[in-house]
Image (cartoon, rainbow, N blue to C red):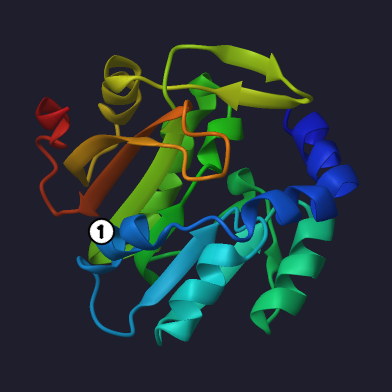
């Protein structure tokens, strides 16, 4: 499933980047960055065009950008002026390295049954008190859509997959409309979580 999705991005990288690189995510950036230390280290998980990585770099943050598509890595690296690591999510192996993780419209390509394990990897990658942002198309669909695999989430599905993720407290969830031109009818579920030392609960009662 992921191979098919990566093939899609390798084959359509230039077209995909043209359609996403100018989207205005500044409001979401600020909502995320307001909870990070100044000039902190951010992991841009599935950076795509490099749009968000460049915005963070321009604001003085240190950014490690990764993507699973070699072609997106090549093009995004040229755009942001630094190499982009070509890694799939299941290959992540960072330990307390980042103040924040930005996973904008990237984890939605992971099958639902595998997402909890990925979130556990992300918690491990965060420094204590680190912040995680992720977004998913809103709903309960899972499967092939337009040549890619998608896992849509609503609040109930998000709560269930995060329940076993020890050490991640949900700070907030919120709904947004797509900011891309002509896509404002599409709804997104956004979640911001914080790495905590509390092992008895993970804050999912806030969902």
The quadrant of the picture occupied by the N terminus is top right
Residue 18 percent location from the top left of the image: 74, 55
Quarter of the image for residue 87 reads bottom right
In this rendering, would 129 be left or right of 110? left
Q: Image height check: is 24 above or below 104?
A: below
In this rendering, would 18 be left or right of 89? right
SS assignment at label 1 = helix
Q: What count of labels does the image hold?
A: 1
Q: Image height check: is 10 above or below 51?
A: above
In this view of the protein, which residue sits in the foreground, 124 or 27? 27
Q: Image height check: is 140 above or below 196?
A: above
Residue reaching furthest right?
11
The quadrant of the picture occupied by the C terminus is top left
In this view of the protein, which residue sits in the foreground, 151 or 23? 23
In this view of the protein, which residue sits in the foreground, 175 or 196? 175
Residue at the spot of label 1: 31
Quarter of the image for residue 109 reads top right
Residue 173 percent location from the top left of the image: 23, 36
In this rendering, would 160 be left or right of 34? right
Give the residue drawn at x 48%, y 48%.
Answer: 104
Residue 198 percent location from the top left of the image: 10, 47
Quarter of the image for residue 59 reads bottom left
- Disc 1 residue crowd, few under 14, some 14–19, many 20+, Cα 10 Å: few
Q: Image height check: is 40 above or below 49?
A: below
In this view of the protein, which residue sits in the foreground, 151 or 164? 151
């Amino acid at each position: 499933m992921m191979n098919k999705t990566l093939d899609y991005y390798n084959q359509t990288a230039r077209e995909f980047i043209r359609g996403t690189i100018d989207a205005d995510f500044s409001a979401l950036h600020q909502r995320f960055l307001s909870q990070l230390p100044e000039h902190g280290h951010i992991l841009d998980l599935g950076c795509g065009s490099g749009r968000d990585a460049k915005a963070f770099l321009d604001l003085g943050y240190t950014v490690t950008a990764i993507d699973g598509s070699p072609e997106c890595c090549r093009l995004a690296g040229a755009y942001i002026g630094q190499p982009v690591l070509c890694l799939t999510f299941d290959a992540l192996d960072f330990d307390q390295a980042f103040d924040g993780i930005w996973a904008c419209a990237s984890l939605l390509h992971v099958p639902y049954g595998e997402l909890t394990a990925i979130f556990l990897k992300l918690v491990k990658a965060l420094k204590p008190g680190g912040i995680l942002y992720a977004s998913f198309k809103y709903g309960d669909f899972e499967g092939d859509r337009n040549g890619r695999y998608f896992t849509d989430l609503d609040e109930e599905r998000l709560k269930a997959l995060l329940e076993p993720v020890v050490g991640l407290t949900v700070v907030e969830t919120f709904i947004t409309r797509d900011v891309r031109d002509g896509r404002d009818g599409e709804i997104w579920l956004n979640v911001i979580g914080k790495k905590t030392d509390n092992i008895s609960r993970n804050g999912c009662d806030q969902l």
